[in-house]
Image (cartoon, rainbow, N blue to C red):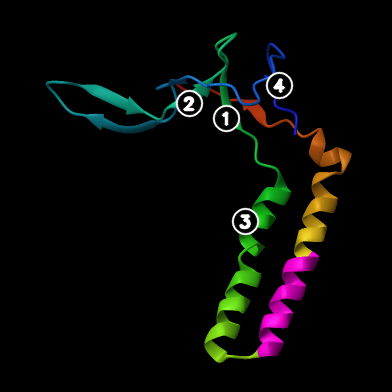
Amino acid sequence: MNYHCPNCKTNLKNRYMPMKGIGDALFTIPLPINKTIRKRIAVCPECGTPLIINVHPFDEVLIQWGTLPLVIFLGGIFIESLAVKVLAGLILFLGFGWSVWVITRPAYRNWKYWRVYNVQL
């Protein structure tokens, strides 16, 4: 993935990302304090641009389907079925190979990890 800031092109991989309360309003404290609590958003340490993570569609698919082999394997333990355990191992092996193939493609490697957060104050 491309971890550069979209504004100043600074590499942000493994960098500390300061947070500021400039996001959407979470809730408002009524009078006498009269304060709005906002969601904390990461900002670029170099240029101060508010950033949010740009999730790749493959990552969403992996989150949804990544637990399937584990669930099948645990079901095989409770059922005590060797066939179910072998099926879970096969699905896990094929899923691992598919994941390695996808993350080595240029479309995934060039995906921008950060995008600019549109501040709505």
Measure the alpha-carbon separation of dots 4 and 2. Answer: 17 Å
Instruction: Find out whether the residues at labels 4 and 1 contact each other: C-beta distance under 8 Å.
Output: no
Measure the alpha-carbon separation of dots 3 and 4. Answer: 24 Å
Measure the alpha-carbon separation of dots 3 and 2. Answer: 23 Å
Q: Amino acid at mark 1?
A: Ile
Q: Nearer the viewer, mark 4 or mark 2?
A: 4
Q: Nearer the viewer, mark 3 or mark 2?
A: 3
Instruction: Find out whether the residues at labels 1 and 3 contact each other: C-beta distance under 8 Å.
Output: no
Q: Amino acid at mark 2?
A: Ile
- Residue named by callout 2: 41
What range of the chain is rendered magenta? 82-94
Q: Please tell me whether residue 118 is drawn above or below residue 94 in the rendered image.
A: above
Q: Please tell me whether residue 74 is drawn above or below residue 26 in the rendered image.
A: below
Which quadrant holds residue 19? top left
- Residue named by callout 1: 52
Q: Residues within 10 Å of mark 1 (few under 14, many from 20)?
A: some
Instruction: Find out whether the residues at labels 3 and 2 contact each other: C-beta distance under 8 Å.
Output: no
Q: In terms of secondary structure, where does tag 2 sit? A: strand
Image coordinates for residue 117, horizontal then vertical, percent: 57, 25
Q: Earlier in the sequence, mark 4 or mark 1?
A: 4
- Residue named by callout 3: 63
- Residue named by callout 4: 4
Q: In terms of secondary structure, where does tag 1 sit? A: strand
Q: Please tell me whether residue 118 is drawn above or below residue 69 in the rendered image.
A: above
Image coordinates for residue 31, horizontal then vertical, percent: 14, 24
Image coordinates for residue 27, horizontal then vertical, percent: 30, 34
Q: Residues within 10 Å of mark 3 (few under 14, many from 20)?
A: few
Which quadrant, please, contains the N terminus?
top right
Query: Looking at the image, which residue is at 58% across and 24% down?
Result: 51
Instruction: Find out whether the residues at labels 4 and 2 contact each other: C-beta distance under 8 Å.
Output: no
